[in-house]
Amino acid sequence: EHVNDLRWMSNDRILSVGNDGHLCECRVENQTNLVELLRSPIRAFTGIDRILPPLTQCSKDSVLLGGYSGNQYILIDYKTFYEFFRTDTGGRARTLLFSLDADSKASNGQPLLSTITTPRKDGLNDLIVESQWIEHPESVRFTLGSNLHNETLFDIDLIRLGNGKLVMLSASEDCSSCISVWNRTLMGIENQALLPPQESGVRAICAKLLADDDSSMFVVEGGCKLLLRFYLIQVTKSSAIHSKFLGKGSPTENAAIDHRINAVDSFPMAKEGSTQFVISGDSNGHVFAYFVSVKGREQTSLQGALVFENPRPVLSLTILCCTLHFCYIVVGTSGGDVFVLSIPFSKTQIIADGSKIHHHLKAHSMGTNCLSALCVDSGTSVMNFRVCSGGDDQAISSFEIAIAPEEVEANARGNSTCTISTIASQQVSISAIRGISWLDDRHIAVSGYGQKLSVWELTENSDLVLRHVDDTEIGDVNSLASAISSDGEKAFIAIAGIGAQLYSVGS
């Protein structure tokens, strides 16, 4: 709808607002082209009519928006959603004059003056003048619990870059994915960027660090209509976020809007990560595989290769490893099943109809909502992995997988070189488990609809012992992710649902 205000945010960034209640950010390329970076609905508004400079108490990066919510005019800080001002104007048809002394030197607030015209039956107008002193308390800070998204978060990932930056990626029902750089010293978000929106919600997201660039990561985003998007994201030492669109992926079949991707994962195929192996699991019970070039030209559209199909929807998946000719993955379905399979490939081409299911476990009596895998031994003859899963049956299942790479490469027929052992299952919650992650080779972080974060230790006897539990303020928990500090002494855990919450565990 009608654009009401524009503001330069930097030499190449422009913000705009309009009667549709959306905030739009564009980048100027080659001095003539506008590239849309984000378009986000601001739920506080039915229409936005102005962008104001930040107050003296706000950070320089804050954005103040003024607009209507029905007949009320409000002023908020977009970064924190802190409301400075609200008045009943009687409707947009009435003229409103709004004055804010943003340059006031007062340390405890700013004066604000508003004037509204009200028509009378005799043809004259009344002027209603309102004066306020608005404050922005020091305690209000932009954290993971505020203004990540306008709707429920479906998925979350947490990654520690080589330059020390802790980055959280979140996917939401509001059709967007958000990249947030966390400042561990200030305990708040240092910078944030939204990826271009997808149609009808983003359901899954994952990130993998590039080996040859400790400030960059490969990001996969999955949504409805079985659509994938691939990005190269760089976070500099100053926390600036730069994104490059690499392409999109879709299956060979035509997908309806209610066909959605539920889980994604990726694995680097070269030491420098120049090619990534990507898998997606969807509501049709299918897993598709892709090879994505990170350093090459933009790949307009990649067709996925079908590597797994099941009558039940795929809810979770993870990649164990890729050898010279095979990739090993674990898949969880809504029936509570877990499958371990290998996917053969030649160079960067999936071998058609070559996938093989090595093991089928009934890990849960109901849906396998989440999976996490950890390599505990990467020897030259055998690679050992520990896998855990969480289900709708309120239980954790765990097992170990041994893969012999040399034997795999010597046996092109794909005879089983993947063995499973130490299978265990234990009920650990009073509600469905929605997120799970290994913190190290013995400790597992778990969360779900019970609104608890718990850390369990897997003993030598394959028993699970509760070591830590904490309440979470996040409702409708859908996902959990973790990252380990550079010294290995602390684990960071993010939980996502109706909002997000970040924890640190350890010394």
Image (tube, rainbow, N blue to C red):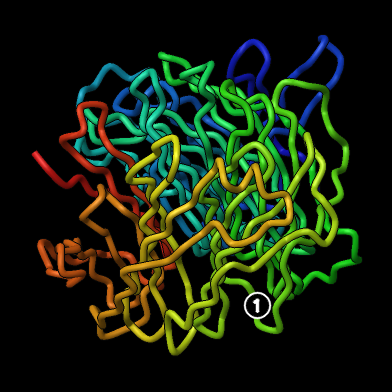
Residue 445 lies, in percent from the top left, at 27, 59
Categorize mark 1 by other alpha carbons within 10 Å: few (<14), some (14-19), many (20+).
many
Residue at the spot 72% in from the left edge and 49% down from the top edge: 412
Q: Nearer the viewer, residue 59 or 438?
A: 438
Residue at the spot 30% in from the left edge and 79% down from the top edge: 425
Observer able to see residue 476: yes
In the picture shown, does residue 182 fall above or below 88? above
**Which quadrant does the C terminus fall into?**
top left
Residue labelled with disc 1: 313
Q: Nearer the viewer, residue 62 or 410?
A: 410
Q: Nearer the viewer, residue 488 or 143?
A: 488
Residue at the spot 73% in from the left edge and 31% down from the top edge: 245
Q: Is residue 112 left or right of residue 226?
A: left
Q: Is residue 265 left or right of residue 224?
A: left
Instruction: State which quadrant residue 129 falls in.
Output: top left
Q: Secondary structure at mark 1?
A: loop
In the picture shown, does residue 56 fall above or below 418? above
Q: Is residue 412 left or right of residue 127?
A: right
- The three-letter code of the residue at mark 1 reads Pro
Q: Is residue 369 left or right of residue 394?
A: right
Residue 149 lies, in percent from the top left, at 51, 53
Residue at the spot 15% in from the left edge and 63% down from the top edge: 460
Q: Nearer the viewer, residue 325 or 312?
A: 325
Instruction: State which quadrant residue 250 falls in.
Output: bottom right
Observer able to see residue 48: no
Residue 233 lies, in percent from the top left, at 59, 28
In the picture shown, does residue 442 fall above or below 335? above
Residue 391 lies, in percent from the top left, at 41, 78
